[in-house]
Amino acid sequence: MLQDIVDTNYFSTVIWNKILEALTYSTEKPWFFTEYSFLLVFGVFLLVYALLIHQNLWRKLYIIGFSLFFYYKSSGPFIGLFALMILSDYFFAIQIHKSIGKKKKLLLLLSVLYSSSFLLYFKYSNFFIANCNELFGTDFTTGNLFLPIGISFYTFQSISYLLDVYRKEIPPAENFSDYTFYMTFFPHLVAGPIVRAKDFLPQIKNPLIINATVYKESIMRITVGLVKKLFIADYLAKYVDLLHQTPEGFSGAEHLLSMYAYTFQIYFDFSGYSDIAIGIALLLGYKLKENFDNPYGSRNITEFWRKWHISLSLWLRDYIYIPLGGNRKGVFNLYLFLMITMLIGGFWHGSDWRFVFWGMAHGLALVFHKLFTKYIKIKDNWITQLLGIILTFHFVGICWIFFRSTSFHNAFYSIHEIFTKTSWIDLQGFWISRPEIIYLLIIASVIVFIPGKLKNQFFQKITNLPAIAWIIILAFSLQLITQFRNDLVQPFIYFQF
């Protein structure tokens, strides 16, 4: 009897602790789509959502409430900062729409500076202080600042909304709840894609009709995203992290394979997140645009930036490159604007000179490609296309080293080892000692280099399969994820941006 009471009390304590854990936030352990606790809570959320799906107002308010809870689970009190930005931008947009002339421009400037101020403070203030101390010998103290999850994404989203209203491309949101829904919609909230108001606001009143086809597509996207993240990206991350902890202890061949591993890791991690976000949005009746389009199959760097992180590429084009002048102010300015745009894109990724250097490298590559195609004409056949894919992929991979390395020294050391100390004997030794990494790199290569059309045809056939086949596919995918899943899931790479 006593043992039963003890067991009951223990069980109650565990349940109560789990409930408290679900209701509290942790800045060290943000809530991921890949967390079992999220999947459990999301399952409960869907049960209630099914009851509200035909009541547009309650459906909207319910999603807003869950989205705010989702953000609270990742950033805690910083939800207040986020709410303040939403409130101010909503009223700024209304006043911008009503105003004309200098007043309109002044309101736009104030609104953009206000929205950007949070990002500048939390993400870049320590960077500027540290560089000021280094350059001028000052002794300003850096703060122990927490970077609110998703601030880079929702700041860019906020700015795009204000600029679109200013340009009269869209009217302001009809009401505060619509704008709040647009800004807080949890699938894309913390790591994109960056959603445009003109694409999303019309869906609030006219969401998708959820039928069997939509359900299948959404479940497929979520499943593919989970496999990309938990099976491929996180497993490759084990080796990448090991090498970058002590880069001096590895051979040139191991650095080369680490470059390939991280090149695939960052793609499968971020595209996996985008797949999950798109799938969850579809499950709720809303459509987000694609964020990746077979980028590693690009034949040149210009094509790569049309296919990689598409929402960011389009944002940089529409709100930085074109307003600067685009290709309308002469050849020299075209190249200058390209460089400025890519430097801003690099700096957006992180408050470190490594990211600025990464942006500069891509900017120079874009300029070089434009000059090359202008003055040198080559035949467009399968040989030149294949050569272009190989060169573009390896250029992008080398640039990713600056993303992953902890310093310029380590990045250049890794590149030096790759180009001067890579040997076939070391590759053979790696095959013997770590065959699972080689197998996974081969699998990743096959996936990323299959033409996009073949992938779409493959997924279309899967979508048309009967229910029993879907159950088998899902069971196999879940088993694969469970088998290879780390006890501690790696944060999505773009959470830090």
Image (tube, rainbow, N blue to C red):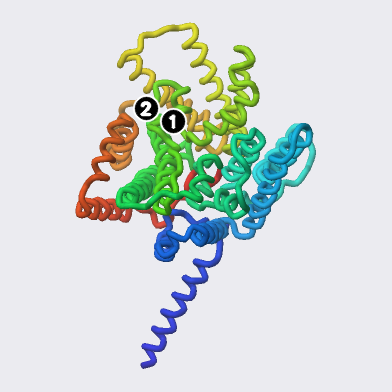
From where the camera sits, is residue 469 visible?
yes
Q: Is residue 456 above or below residue 214?
A: above
Q: Which amino acid does the dot numbered 2 rest on? A: Gly
* Mark 2 vs 1: CB contact within 8 A: yes
Q: Secondary structure at mark 1?
A: helix
What kind of residue is marked 1?
Lys
Q: Is residue 445 left or right of residue 309?
A: left
Nearest the viewer among 223 and 64 is 64
Q: Nearer the viewer, residue 242 or 330?
A: 330
User: Is residue 354 visible in this depiction of the protein?
Assistant: no
At x 52%, y 42%, the residue is 195
3D distance between C-alphas at marks 2 and 1: 9 Å
Question: Within 10 angstroms of label 2, few (less than 14), some, or many (20 or more) residues?
Answer: many
Where residue 71 sits: x, y (%)?
55, 56
Q: Is residue 245 above or below residue 53?
A: above
What label sits on residue 452 in the rendered view? none
Identify the residue at horizontal 46%, vertical 28% (top origin).
306
For the point 45% across and 37% down, the residue is 291
Q: Which mark is residue 297?
A: 2
Residue under label 1, please give it. Answer: 307
221 sits left or right of 185 in the view: left
